Amino acid sequence: MKFKIIGYEGLNKVAMTQALREYSGKGLSDSKQMTDDLLKNGSLEFEVTESPNTEKLLKVLREANANVSV
């Protein structure tokens, strides 16, 4: 499943990094880099292998104030 984040307002960086780490299979370093890339560029695209975790990841990213779509 392809995720696309375009913008954020009041992003909870810690929550986003933790969600990426827990639900996307990325390590801490990669998850932090993805969060930093979003902050730097204002957008981020990535893919997650279809799994039961994809819906949870979507929910947690939205709760972290990321404007995410799939």
Image (tube, grey):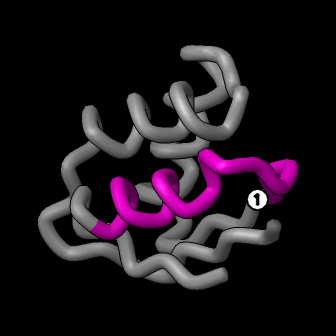
> Which is nearer the eye, 60 or 37?
60
Residue located farthest toward the left when viewing the structure as drawn? 10
Q: Is-magenta flag for residue 51?
A: yes
Please, what is the three-letter code of the amino acid marked with disc 1? Phe
Where is residue 63? Give x, y as percent: 23, 62
Q: Which residue is found at the position 81% from the left and 67% from the top?
A: 1
Left-right relation of 55 to 48: left
Where is residue 52? Give x, y as percent: 66, 49
Other residues around mark 1 within 10 Å, as few (<14) / some (14–19) / many (≥20)? few
Q: How many marks?
A: 1
Helix, strand or loop for the magenta stretch, by majority:
helix
Q: Is-magenta flag for residue 32?
A: no
- Circle 1 residue: 46
Where is residue 3? Give x, y as percent: 68, 70
Left-right relation of 2 to 34: right
Where is residue 42? Give x, y as percent: 48, 72
With respect to residue 12, does 24 lie above or below? Answer: above
Q: Which residue is found at the position 37% from the left and 44% from the top?
A: 16
